[in-house]
Image (tube, rainbow, N blue to C red):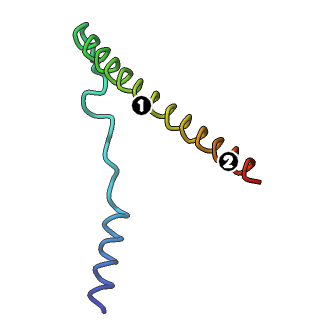
């Protein structure tokens, strides 16, 4: 039990006396300029994502339309059976 308390005490002492890392060192003042080919590639990737969303939206619309039309048919059937 004494060794466990010694380990926790030494870990706490180490964490309390440790200094923070200096995050300002390094290449933080460097400016990265993308060329036109990089921008063209990113634009193409965005176009692919948008084009892939079109069938997903159409399928979602069809599913909602199908679910609502089935629900309306059931309501009409229930009213007609009474």
Specify the quadrant of the image occupied by residue 25: top left
Q: Report the number of discs.
A: 2
For image coordinates 34% across by 62% down, the residue present is 17
Q: Quadrant of the N terminus?
A: bottom left
Query: In this orientation, which residue lies closer to the viewer: 33 or 37?
Result: 37
Query: In this orientation, which residue lies closer to the viewer: 53 or 78?
Result: 78
For image coordinates 70% across by 44% down, the residue present is 76
The image shows residue 6, relative to residue 28, as above or below, that is below
Query: In this orientation, which residue lies closer to the viewer: 5 or 40?
Result: 40
Q: Residue 77: which numbered mark, if any?
A: 2
For image coordinates 41% across by 31% down, the residue present is 56
- Residue 61, percent across and down? 51, 31
* Residue that numbered label 1 is attached to: 56
The image shows residue 35, relative to residue 58, as above or below, that is above
For image coordinates 29% across by 12% down, the residue present is 39
In the picture provided, is 66 more to the left or to the right than 23?
Answer: right
- Residue 48, percent across and down? 31, 21
Q: Quadrant of the C terminus?
A: bottom right
Q: Secondary structure at mark 1?
A: helix
Q: CA distance from mark 2 to mark 1?
A: 32 Å
In the picture provided, is 60 more to the left or to the right than 55?
Answer: right
- Residue 33, percent across and down? 27, 13
Which of marks 1 and 2 precedes in the sequence? 1
Within-10-Å neighbours for mark 1: few <14, some 14–19, many 20+: few
The image shows residue 5, relative to residue 74, as above or below, that is below
The label nearer to you, 2 versus 1, is 2
């Amino acid at each position: 039990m004494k060794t466990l308390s010694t380990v926790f005490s030494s870990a706490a002492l180490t964490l309390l006396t440790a200094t923070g890392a200096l995050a300002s060192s390094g290449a933080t003042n460097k400016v990265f300029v993308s060329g036109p080919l990089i921008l063209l590639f990113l634009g193409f990737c965005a176009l692919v994502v948008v084009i892939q969303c079109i069938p997903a939206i159409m399928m979602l619309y069809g599913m909602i339309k199908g679910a609502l039309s089935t629900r309306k048919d059931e309501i009409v059937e229930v009213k007609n059976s009474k």
